[in-house]
Amino acid sequence: MKHKLSITDEQIERSIYLIRGKKVMIDRDLARLYGVETRVLNQAVKRNVRRFPDDFMFKLTPSEFENWISQFVISNSEKMGMRKPPLVFTEQGVAMLSSVLNSETAIDVNIQIIRIFTRMRQLLVSHKDLLLKIEQIEKRLLIRMRKWSYCLSM
């Protein structure tokens, strides 16, 4: 019997950050979405560390950690237990998590997360296409304006 997820796309989208130019998710946010403790998620990752190369997962540097905390105005109660920089997972790392957290919830949540990453990537591509079209229109307008300006100066 299939159970219904009570996690909204918006909850997942709010948990995706841009760090080192990559869209990533923080270990504690992923643990919350999967319904496990952060330490359980991190233990599973440590037992399977070969599955998580640097482009799948990395640890925030102390300065990145401080910057992340200050950017998102995390309250003292939310910081409890956050004495060290968290692990962060790229889209590929999130996909790999479903293989080390072998539960129905992890699989279902991962499918939802991967779909959101895909949708974000498609949105970015469509924005690039729009930007290119706008640039082309601007170039044509600039050429026409120069011609018009030249005609007026004669």
Image (cartoon, helix red, strand yellow):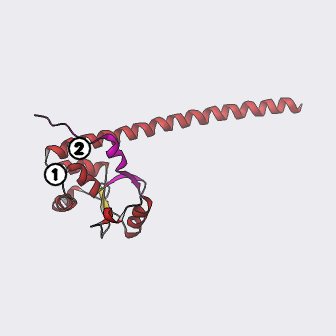
The one of 14 and 96 positioned closer to us in this rendering: 14
The residue where tag 1 is placed is: 101
Side of 14 relative to 31 (left or right): right
Count of labels shown?
A: 2
What residue is at 60 percent from the left and 36 percent from the top? Answer: 135
Q: Quick one: SS at disc 2? A: helix
Residue 62, percent from left and from top: 37, 70
**Which quarter of the rendering shows the C terminus?**
top right
**Which quarter of the rendering shows the N terminus?**
top left
Q: Work out how far the residue at label 2 is from the one at label 1, CA to CA, in angstroms.
A: 11 Å
The one of 72 and 25 positioned closer to us in this rendering: 72
Q: Which amino acid, mark 1?
A: Leu
Q: Which residues are magenta?
A: 1-25
Q: Is residue 145 above or below residue 53?
A: above
Q: Is residue 10 magenta?
A: yes
Callouts 2 and 1 close, C-beta under 8 Å: no
Sooner in the amino-acid sequence: mark 2 or mark 1: 1
The residue where tag 2 is placed is: 109
The one of 26 and 9 positioned closer to us in this rendering: 9
What residue is at 50 percent from the left and 34 percent from the top? Answer: 129
